Amino acid sequence: MRLVTDIHESTVVIAMSGRLDGAAALEFERQVHDMLLQETGDRLILDFTALTYISSVGLRVLLGIGQALRARQGNMVLVGLDETVREVFEFSGFLTLFRCVDTVQIALADEANP
């Protein structure tokens, strides 16, 4: 798993590549929570364009991050789910829990015009 982070005003954008499973998911959770504690923004865009796999542990981590953001009146948008990852989200019911869009640009435009 590889993370690349960018800040756009009050929005944190994290691009992830590789697999979000097991230990990688727990490390991802720690890094995201640390980052959100340091940043003033409560908006998170997760760019999964290069994510190839997500496990149930990865889903649980996303659920926890989403709940933490909602408790702070924040939100999370998922970007670029490939077919395999989208199927996991669909079968688990997670597509109804998170906003999913095709590109980071769309997510940023939506954040600029709530």
Image (tube, rainbow, N blue to C red):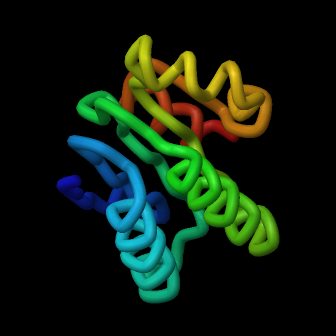
Vertical arrangement, residue 39 with respect to residue 12, above or below: below
Q: Position of residue 26 (x, y in %)?
A: 44, 70
Residue located 37% across and 53% down the image: 13
Residue at the (36%, 34%) spot, across then down? 53
Going by the image, does 64 lie left or right of 49?
A: right
* Residue displayed at 53% across by 71% down: 41
Judge from the rendering whether residue 66 lies leftward or rightward of residue 35; answer left or right: right
The percent position of residue 79, horizontal first and vertical second, equals 44, 31
With respect to residue 1, does 47 lie above or below? above
Q: How many marks?
A: 0
Vertical arrangement, residue 96 with respect to residue 76, above or below:
above
Query: Which is more toward the observer, 40 or 95?
Result: 95
Q: Is residue 68 left or right of residue 80?
A: right
Which residue is outermost to the top? 83
91 up-or-down from 104: above or below: above
Image location (x, y in percent) of residue 28: 38, 66
Question: Could you tell me which quadrant the C terminus lies in?
Answer: top right
Q: Which sits in the foreground, 28 or 11?
A: 28
Q: Quadrant of residue 62?
A: bottom right
Q: What residue lies at 62% left-to-right and 28% top-to-bottom?
A: 89
Query: Of residues 74 and 8, which is closer to you in this image?
Result: 74
Taking depth in this image into account, of 19 and 63 the one nearest to the observer is 19
Q: Is residue 56 left or right of residue 47?
A: right
Q: In the image, residue 112 lies at what x, y percent?
A: 55, 42
Q: Quadrant of residue 48?
A: top left
